Amino acid sequence: MTEKLIDQKPSKYAKNMWWEFLHEKGLCGLCGNHGIVDTRRNMFTPAGVECGVRRFCICPNGRAMKKQGAKL
């Protein structure tokens, strides 16, 4: 099932949502035009388990990296 989600094109909803995060200077407000969103930085549960994800962004840079098979 995960493979199905990875191969899907971004929905119209995802594209519209990204436009809300677009900075006035053309920078992505989610990843800063790096193409990767990393929420793992120094985030731990009370039990000491690292939480967060590192995934491709929904911006054009992230989608292009994902399509070309870039490694995270």
Image (tube, rainbow, N blue to C red):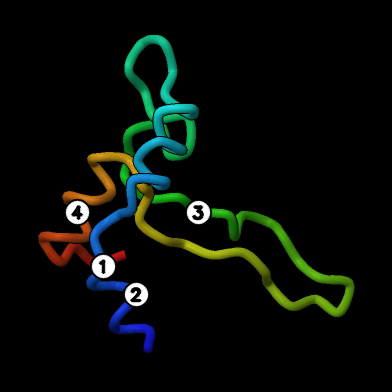
- Left or right position of 15 against 48: left
- On screen, residue 29 versus residue 6, left or right, reads right
Q: CA distance from mark 1 to mark 4?
A: 14 Å
**Which residue occupies the foreground of this view, 8 or 50?**
8
- Residue that sits furthest to the bottom in the current view: 1
At 30% from the left and 72% from the top, the residue drawn is: 6
Q: Secondary structure at mark 4?
A: helix
What mark, if any, has residue 38 been given in the picture?
3
Report the mark closest to the observer, 4 or 3: 4
Frontmost of labels 1 and 4 is: 1
Give residue 16's position: percent from left, percent from top.
40, 36
Q: Circle 2 is placed at which residue position? A: 5
Kindly give the residue lying farthest to the top in the view shown.
24
Residue shown at 89%/72% (left/top)? 46
**Residue ID at (29%, 83%):** 3
Instruction: Look at label 4 and name its amino acid.
Output: Met
Q: CA distance from mark 3 to mark 1?
A: 21 Å
Residue type highlighted by circle 1: Gln
**For the residues bearing labels 2 and 4, Cβ distance under 8 angstroms:** no
Mark 4: give few (<14), some (14-19) or many (20+) Cα within 10 Å. some
First reached walking from the N terminus: tag 3 or tag 2: 2
Residue 13, horizontal then vertical, whole percent: 41, 46
Q: Quadrant of the N terminus?
A: bottom left
Quadrant in which residue 24 is drawn: top left
